[in-house]
Amino acid sequence: MKAISILRMLIVCLAGITLSACTDWMYDDRSGCEHGVCLSFKYDYNLQRADMIGHVGSVGVFVYDEEGRFVTSYIEPNLRRTQPCLYLDLPQGNYQFLAVAQQRSFDELQAGPGANFTWSAPYAGDGIDDFSVSLAHQDLGNGFATVPHGNLPLDTLWHAVSATPLYVPAEGYAYDTLSLVRDTKSISVSLREIDRPETMDVADYDFFIYHRDLTMAYSPATHDLEASAQARMAIYTPYATWNTSDTDASAARSDAGRTAHADFMTSRLYADGAEEDRARLLIRHRDTDHTVIEADLCNLLGQLRNYDETQRYSLQEFLDRGYDFRLTFFLQGGEWQYAEVSIGILGWSKRIQNVSLD
């Protein structure tokens, strides 16, 4: 499988696919081009249950025929200018669509620092089940890899897959809407000492998230992007760490409590799969090498999934809809006693005692 950058994929598509003037990003005048597909996008698959499509910047659309063979692709660097829809000049037939989207334009991302997502290059006739998206990583050997974030958060990644094939007539438009799922997750972890809060220092701890989610591949069984079991195990480290002091402590006090903070950004979290592949949060004391926290991350975050009694989310749906998770652990005697799990934008919060959540 050939993984190429999103920018290179754009070059391949433009060089290898002949596009008519009807698809040449002509938004104002479509006279003589009244055929093909009017493709819209929405992003309401979130816990707010609101369409936040305005967060999306660039989108790449991959077109497959009804048998799942690659036909062509379209790159739109600024989705906001395609309203009410992105026009695709396609001949009569049945088509499926797979899309990936990010906040910034693809070429800007590839030229900038930090870790970026890449995808496999589809060629004419390739199957949709050959498609995959991978996060840049450095091989550590023994099946592990680290994500070189460069102290920067990942750019947000979304994906969408057609629910059913769309029939495109010879004359006139066919209309379809792709529902985007956010893949990237922001996870903020905080530590607090119960007995001696003034001793807390983020420099005393190493923070890690382990998860086999570096490559997401299309699955014909679920019609979704699933974690590839053949990919290396990702080791995520925080892109930012810092301490804060109690805001109500006077400047003269030397025993003011402190809280350690570590911010992560990861690819999609998967609740299912082999136990050894599932996401785990690991925090270790640097001097003693003692593991103070080792927890099933998905199950820990999932304690909030029924907070809204009007909704009953499965664990995977909750993880897909959520994206701004916060965990605060309270330590005593080198072990965590309880944690507060919250979602920042909604104000949801729940206290979890240190019992087995597996």
Image (cartoon, rainbow, N blue to C red):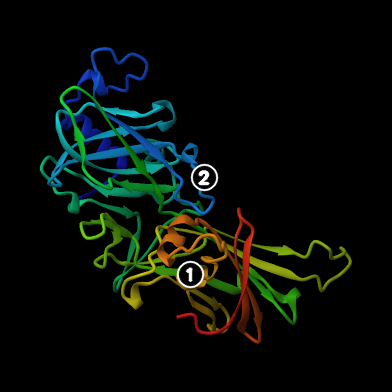
Q: Which residue is mark 1?
A: 208
Where, quadrant-wise, is the N terminus in this rendering?
Answer: bottom left
Q: Residue at x 83, y 71 (%)?
A: 254
Locate residue 150, reporting x and y percent: 47, 53
User: Please, is residue 323 above or below residue 252 in the view?
Assistant: above
Choose the circle earlier in sequence order: 2 or 1: 2
* Residue type for callout 2: Ala
Element type where label 1 sits in the image:
strand
**Frontmost residue, 92 versus 79:** 92
Where, quadrant-wise, is the C terminus in this rendering?
Answer: bottom left
Element type where label 2 sits in the image:
loop
Locate residue 199, reporting x and y percent: 72, 76
Locate residue 156, reporting x and y percent: 45, 48
Q: Residue at x 29, y 60 (%)?
A: 226
Q: Residue at x 23, y 13 (%)?
A: 32
User: Please, is residue 179 above or below residue 276 in the view?
Assistant: above
**Frontmost residue, 345 versus 258:** 345
Q: Nearer the viewer, mark 2 or mark 1?
A: 2
Locate residue 351, reporting x and y percent: 63, 73
Q: Which residue is mark 2?
A: 50
User: Please, is residue 118 above or below residue 332 in the view?
Assistant: above
Q: Residue furthest front?
A: 310
Q: Tell me whether circle 2 and circle 1 mark residues in contact (CB < 8 Å).
A: no
**Along the horizontal axis of the image, is 124 left or right of 148?**
left
Q: Residue at x 49, y 68 (%)?
A: 302
